[in-house]
Image (tube, rainbow, N blue to C red):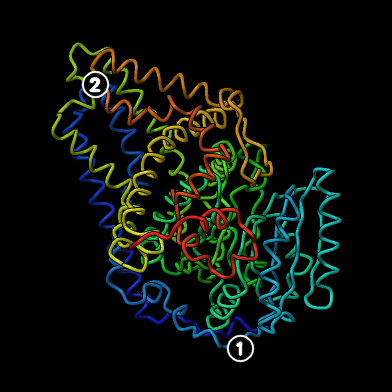
């Protein structure tokens, strides 16, 4: 093992000074923009009543996520369009790797599973192991399948599948299958158990989820970067969605693909060595992770006490506190995951994250955290607190219209010119990451072709924008109800497994899940339409997704709809235009469907 006490610091004084200036500039930009938006809000809705004051308070809560996302997007766009090597601009050491450096580090690959379909897990692992064998480095890697499965039937399938999988690779690469009988500490506890048992046997560890796909080429690149920078504690890849035949997943991941591109580059520019960790598709340096990243058990009972659910960003903060870097590798097409195939599955996953992020309140007082790390924890909290704030704004607007003597009392119409400008600027900031990435795609001929050509791409941007307008209010109300249960009723969610395969959602299940959303949406639209017909456009933008949530959930889950969208190229991503060779062994139905589609012109 390398003696970390004498390991040289990779970051020079000049780089640290540059990073400090970047953070100062970013802080000034965010602060000035926030102040400007608040000034416009006060002009549009003067605080002359309790309702107007509450409106301004709630609007203030929504600002951090929008303003930070806006400036991340602007900076990301400038890097994408103005730098010959965007990676070098935000992660210089990663750009130094040629790809032929000798791999020497002993590396564990951690596949964490819980009540998953084992055949799908081995499907994603097989190309990875084949690649390591082909590169003649299999002897340096050890795969650990870390199971927390509790379902008796799945346990039987797991045992049969993974025992056969180990036998197949016995003479080629080391594989260990371990199943815990108790899910203590959830996924973080699963990895901690590995660290306590086998962490000392390896220098590095690659973390994977059951839906992860990371090819051998990517893992070798991550290892090489870690080898040249001994003070790099965590290196996170930019994760994109695998091609899917689910309508929901296709549109969702198309939007995420655009948004993440500029957002991650911009964030990496000012976060630098205090970057993000998303818990999977990343590589860890085990010695400092074992020593410094053990998560505290929070006092009190569930839902906000006990073991930490959203472990990743906390572990990143602890790694930085120990003096090690946490960085992101903002490169597309090297790391994938499967996105939820339905709205209901997406909500199931998102509410678990919501509950975990709310636990961060208890961790803000941890001593020694870097200022950027504390900001990231606060920002993660505000990501979800913004939802009830948005719902509060919608409710105040609807009630003001309902009880006002004139239409001008509406916050949407008060100070009409300023209010309209404020509304337009907010939409611009919210969609800025997608706008920035879309502009960059349209500026590059080869990238346009990878998305099916300019016309196809523009139509898909329009489709995804409509999708976002329908999805966003549904998620905002869902978060609001969940946070009410969490804080007032002390009821959280359950750590359940995901249904990852495309499947239909019956009408009765959608109605049972989304009837409150439907009633809320119809109420807002009805009140505004009855009182001030000229404001009905605002009403549909704010509540149209709520009113249509049931058919939206059913239609975006329908397998026939998803297959049709895949065949005509709706939600098309570059992997469907020219499938990377490493994805072909997965036999993805979306690639088969897109292969029957005629090639588009640029």
Q: Is residue 500 above or below residue 393?
A: below
Report the front residue among 254 and 84. Answer: 254
Quadrant (top left/top right/bottom left/bottom right) for the C terminus: bottom left
Position of 77 compared to 288: left or right? Answer: left
Residue 140, position as x, y percentages in the image: 71, 80
Give the residue displayed 23% in from the left and 40% down from the top: 424
The number of numbered discs placed on residues in the rendered structure image is 2
Query: Dot 1 corresponds to which residue?
Result: 102
Q: Is residue 335 above or below residue 499?
A: below
Q: Residue 259: image x %, image y %?
A: 39, 54
User: In this picture, is 238 found above or below 507?
Assistant: below
Quadrant of image for the N terminus: bottom right
Q: Where is residue 438 shown, x and y percent of the image?
A: 32, 56
Q: Quadrant of residue 212?
A: bottom right
Residue in view at x 35 percent, y 39 percent: 62
x then y, percent, for residue 183? 76, 48
Residue 403 falls in which quadrant of the image? Answer: top left
Residues under numbered marks 2 and 1 in contact, where contact means CB atoms less than 8 Å apart: no
Q: Secondary structure at mark 1?
A: loop
Q: Is residue 23 left or right of residue 93?
A: left
Give the CA separation, mark 2 to mark 1.
69 Å
Q: Nearest the camera: 185 or 86? A: 86
In front of the other: 452 or 141: 452
Residue depicted at x 33% and y 75%: 17
Q: Residue at x 47, y 78 (%)?
A: 94
Q: Residues within 10 Å of mark 2 (few under 14, many from 20)?
A: few
Query: For this rendering, which residue is in front, 97 or 316?
Result: 97
Q: Residues within 10 Å of mark 1 (few under 14, many from 20)?
A: few
Element on which disc 2 rests = loop
Dot placed on the residue nearer the N-terminal end, 2 or 1: 2
Residue behind mark 2: 49
- Residue 56, which numbered label? none
């Amino acid at each position: 093992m390398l003696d970390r006490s004498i390991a040289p610091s990779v970051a020079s004084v000049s780089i640290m000074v540059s990073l400090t200036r970047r953070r100062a500039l970013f802080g000034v930009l965010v602060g000035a923009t926030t102040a400007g938006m608040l000034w416009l809000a006060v002009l549009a809705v003067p605080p002359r009543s309790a309702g107007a004051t509450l409106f301004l308070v709630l609007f203030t809560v929504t600002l951090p996520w929008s303003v930070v996302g806006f400036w991340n997007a602007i900076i990301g766009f400038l890097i994408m369009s103005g730098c010959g090597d965007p990676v070098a601009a935000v992660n210089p050491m990663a750009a130094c790797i040629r790809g032929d450096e000798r791999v020497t580090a002993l590396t564990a690959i951690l596949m964490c599973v819980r009540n998953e379909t084992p055949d799908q897990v081995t499907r994603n692992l097989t190309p990875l192991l084949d690649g390591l064998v082909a590169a003649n480095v299999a002897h340096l890697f050890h795969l650990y399948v870390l199971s927390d499965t509790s379902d008796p039937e799945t346990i039987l399938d797991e045992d049969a599948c993974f025992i056969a999988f180990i036998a197949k690779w016995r003479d080629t690469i080391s594989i260990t299958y371990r199943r815990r009988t108790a899910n203590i500490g959830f996924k973080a506890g699963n990895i901690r158990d590995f660290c306590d048992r086998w962490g000392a046997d390896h220098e590095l560890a690659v973390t994977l989820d059951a839906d992860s796909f990371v090819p051998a080429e990517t893992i070798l690149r991550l290892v090489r970067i870690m080898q040249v920078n001994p003070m790099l504690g965590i290196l996170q890849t930019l994760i994109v969605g695998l091609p899917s035949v689910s309508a929901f997943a296709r549109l969702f991941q198309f939007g995420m693909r655009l948004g993440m591109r500029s957002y991650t580059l911009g964030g990496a520019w000012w976060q630098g060595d205090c970057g993000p960790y998303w818990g999977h598709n990343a590589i860890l340096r085990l010695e400092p992770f074992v020593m410094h990243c053990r998560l505290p058990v929070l006092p009190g009972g569930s839902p906000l006490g006990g073991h930490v659910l959203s472990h990743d960003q906390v572990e990143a903060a602890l790694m930085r506190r120990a003096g090690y870097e946490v960085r992101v590798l903002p490169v597309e097409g090297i790391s994938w995951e499967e996105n939820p195939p339905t709205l209901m599955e997406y909500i199931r996953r998102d509410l678990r994250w919501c509950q975990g992020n709310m636990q961060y309140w208890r961790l803000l007082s941890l001593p020694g955290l870097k200022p950027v790390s504390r900001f990231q924890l606060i920002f993660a909290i505000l990501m979800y607190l913004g939802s009830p704030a948005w719902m509060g704004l919608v409710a105040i607007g609807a009630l003001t219209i309902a009880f006002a003597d004139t239409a001008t009392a509406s916050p949407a119409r008060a100070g009409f010119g300023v209010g309209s400008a404020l509304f337009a600027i907010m939409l611009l900031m919210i969609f800025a990451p997608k706008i920035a990435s879309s502009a960059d795609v349209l500026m590059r001929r080869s990238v346009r072709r990878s998305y099916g050509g300019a016309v196809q791409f523009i139509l898909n941007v329009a489709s995804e924008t409509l999708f976002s307008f329908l999805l966003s209010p549904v998620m905002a109300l869902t978060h609001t109800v969940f946070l009410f249960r969490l804080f007032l009723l002390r009821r959280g969610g359950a750590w359940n497994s995901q249904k990852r395969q495309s499947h239909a959602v019956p009408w009765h299940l959608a109605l049972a899940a989304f009837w409150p959303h439907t009633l809320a949406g119809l109420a807002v639209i009805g009140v505004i339409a009855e009182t001030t017909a000229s404001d009905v456009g605002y009403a549909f933008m704010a509540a149209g997704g709520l009113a249509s949530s049931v058919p939206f959930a059913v239609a975006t889950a329908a397998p026939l709809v998803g297959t049709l969208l895949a065949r005509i190229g709706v939600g098309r991503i570059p992997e469907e235009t020219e499938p990377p060779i490493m994805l072909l062994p997965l036999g993805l139905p979306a690639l088969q469907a897109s292969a029957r589609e005629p090639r588009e012109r640029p």
